[in-house]
Image (tube, grey):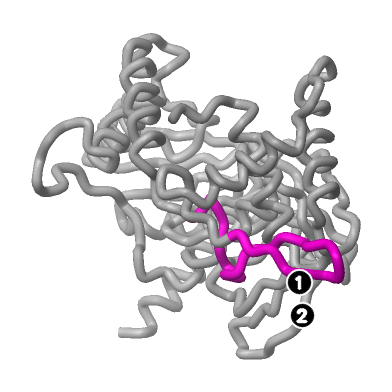
Amino acid sequence: MAINKNALLRYKVLDKCFRNNGRRYYIEDLLNEVNDALLDENPNSSGIQLRQLREDFRMMKSEAGFNAPIDAIRDGKKAYYVYSEKDFSINNSPLNETEMGQLKNAISLLRKFEGRQEFEWLNELGPILNDRIGQVDHSKPIIGFDSNLDYAGNQHIPELFNAILNKRVLELVYKSFKGDSYTVTCHPYYLKQYNNRWFLFGRNEQNDHNQWNFPLDRIDSITELDQPYLTDSTDWEDYFFDIIGVTRKPIELQEVVLEFNSEQVQYIQTKPIHPSQREKILESGKLLVTIKVIPNFELEALILSFGDNVNVISPESIKIKIFERLKMALNQY
């Protein structure tokens, strides 16, 4: 059974309602939620009737659907609907055969655009999907990915992704590196991965800050709250463009000039350290690289990772920081 766009939207709306333990959704409430979403998607939509809604229930509960544990709880003469398994979500369910087939067809369609400049990202996506989905028949994986399966925050990613998608306010029990635990009310906006760690960016209600950074491995538990969600207008791609990593300080952009040894020339040219990178090969064979970024800890860590193959030319403030850190490292031996 094919799942069209409207059906998928209905399932997602119902999924959000069934997972919301802060409110009781009776059959009329569910019908209204679904039809409101359909109307938002298409102002000309006439919505669905109860018969279709009950058919959606049946589809979601079936093996061909999501094996959703939808439960009707009696409340007098009426019943409200919830998931009997608290942590269930259709977004966490494995792909069924229908979805797998649709995804393979989508991959085949996308691969037709490979080689075009505006679809360069497909060159990486295609092999990854083929290996994971299994378009190519092989008994063992033939491609490896840089990921940390043991990372402590991985288990939070689906829940946080769904909270962002469905605009849900969260209560986070957060633990600092010092071991102190405290509770934060968060309006989640964006998930970012850097250096095999994941970070949630959102509004910290206690600090009245809309770009607060929560490393996922510091989050102990997540509870959904029944309160209004405050949206945010941050352009997150633009927000991260001016930095390396995830730490953005309230300071101006600076031009950072680095000189790399000749052995690093091809490496730095083929793998730029930042999108703003400009290069010049010197008569000595060394490579002069200029980037425009907001300095942060991640920039310092990146420079240090090149060891004696790089020299900071400017600004003087970064040059001094790198010198002091190298001196402290030397004192460890």
Question: x, y (%) of residue 123?
Answer: 32, 24
Question: Which residue in the rendered view is the most extreme toward the front?
Answer: 77
Mark 2 / mark 1, whichever is N-terminal: 1
Q: Is residue 178 visible?
A: yes
Among the 4 quarters of the image, the one containing residue 219: bottom right
Among the 4 quarters of the image, the one containing residue 102: top left
For residue 115: magenta?
no
Which label was assigned to residue 95?
none
- At a point 65% along the width and 51% down the height, the residue shown is 15
Decide: is 124 above or below 141: above
User: SS for tag 2?
Assistant: strand
Q: How many marks?
A: 2
Q: Over which residues does the magenta segment extend?
A: 70-92
Which label was assigned to residue 183?
2
User: SS for tag 1?
Assistant: strand
Decide: is 114 above or below 187: above
Image quarter of the N terminus: top left
Q: Which residue is mark 1?
A: 171
Q: CA distance from mark 2 to mark 1?
A: 7 Å
User: Disc 2, disc 1: CB below 8 Å?
Assistant: yes
Question: x, y (%) of residue 147?
Answer: 35, 56
